[in-house]
Structure formats: C-alpha cells, structure tokens
Amino acid sequence: MKKNCTNTLRTLVLVTTVLLGMNVSASESELNGVFRFGLDFGGETLGTFFFNGGSSQDVKSHEGVYLAGGMEYEFVESLFIRGTIGYKFNTVTASNGEADFSRVPLEFLLIKKMGVHRLGGGTMYHVLSNYSCKFDNVCDFSIGIRNALGWLVEYGYEVLIPNRDRKMTIGIRYSRINYTPESGGDTVAGKGLGVSFGFLF
C-alpha cells in the first residue's frame, strides 16, 4: 500500500511539473498552472476505530485531505476549463496500526468567472482507490476499489495574495461518486461537502 502511495505521489509531481513547464510558453491570459488542496467531509462509514479513553474515529467514504495540480485554460473570455490530477486520503493511526482509504482523483471542470466569483461543475474519475486496515488483533486486509466516475460542483472566491502577483481561490464544493470493491459486493456512496484552496500561477 505504501509503495503504491509513493508511486502515485511521484506520478503526481511529475505530471504537475510537466504541465507547469508547458505554461512557460503559453499566454498568461489563456493558460495557467493550478495547485489545489482541501478537505472533504461526510459519506458512509467504512470503519469505526476506538481508542483508550473512550474516543473513536471513523473512516468515511467521502472524507479526506486532498492535493492536486494541473492546468486551467481560458478558451473564451471569463470561461475556463480546468483539469487536475491529485491524491486524496483519509487515515486513522494508532500505536498498533493504521487504517487508510486513498484514491487518485482526475477532475475536469467548466468554470464561469464573474468578477471575483467563480462557479463551476464537471466530472471526476477516481483511480487506484484502496481501503486498507492493519491493526494488531483487529484487522489485516486491503481492498481494491474499481475505477469510478462521479460529478462535482463548486463555488470559489478569488483574492489577490498581498505583495505577490498571484491569485488564490477559497471555495466550497459538493461532490458525489459511488465506490464498488474490485471483488464485487455492495456499492458505497461517497458524497458530501468540502472546502478548497487554489492557487493560480
């Protein structure tokens, strides 16, 4: 699992670097590099883990921290296409092990800019998804998840970073996708709200 995550992150860095390299020769008003990160909430509970002291933590199908990089292209005035590749994960760790739900999201959005407001929607495709659990005397498994297609909508508010010629977007989003184990079985819905932060350069 850790090896797959490492390879995924290397791929993300490589693709982002190549895309940003392409941006050098393009017109600034048409093509920009994008870096995004955020946090999603909600979804169905995949597992609940209890700790000494009575506290607990869930791994849910939509929750997770994500990082993404890519490009945004303005093909007509105030209308953009954005494509990104990222890495999203939700991990519970303890002294006797960890549980993790990870996936690689590919996202393609059509975005309308209205002053400092940005409204967008599109599709997402999750690949290399995996749910693993390894706690001493509790669980020891790794479940591969089929590639899945979903959709999302988002609103962003654009601000200029002080003392820098860079723009930042603060936003909220709603996304929905269904996950099915590679071995078959019940489908789990991954849907909910999230917050995001994006940088254009």
Image (cartoon, grey):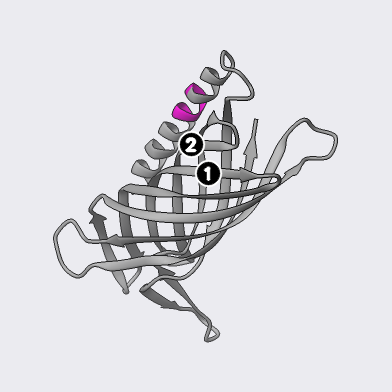
Q: Which residue is drawn at 44% across and 38% down?
A: 9
Q: In this view, does 154 lie above or below 21?
A: below
Q: Residue at x 48, y 64 (%)?
A: 93
Tag on residue 81?
2
Amino acid, disc 1: Ile
Image spot of residue 123 (x, y percent): 38, 48
Question: Quick one: quadrant of the C terminus?
Answer: top right
Is the residue under label 2 in contact with that under label 1 (CB below 8 Å)? yes
Tag on residue 111?
1
Rate crowding at label 2 as few (under 14), some (14 to 19) or many (20 or more) other CA atoms within 10 Å: some
Instruction: Tell me which corner region of the image, top left, top right, bottom left or bottom right, holds residue 46.
Output: bottom left
Rate crowding at label 1 as few (under 14), some (14 to 19) or many (20 or more) other CA atoms within 10 Å: many
Q: What stretch is highlighted in magenta?
A: 14-18
Q: Is residue 106 above or below residue 189?
A: above
Q: In this view, does 16 lie above or below 44?
A: above
Instruction: Tell me which corner region of the image, top left, top right, bottom left or bottom right, holds residue 164.
Output: top right
**Near-viewer residue (63 or 154):** 154
Q: In this view, does 146 lie above or below 140?
A: above
Q: Which residue is drawn at 61% across and 43% down?
A: 113
Q: Residue furthest front?
A: 77
SS label for mark 1: strand
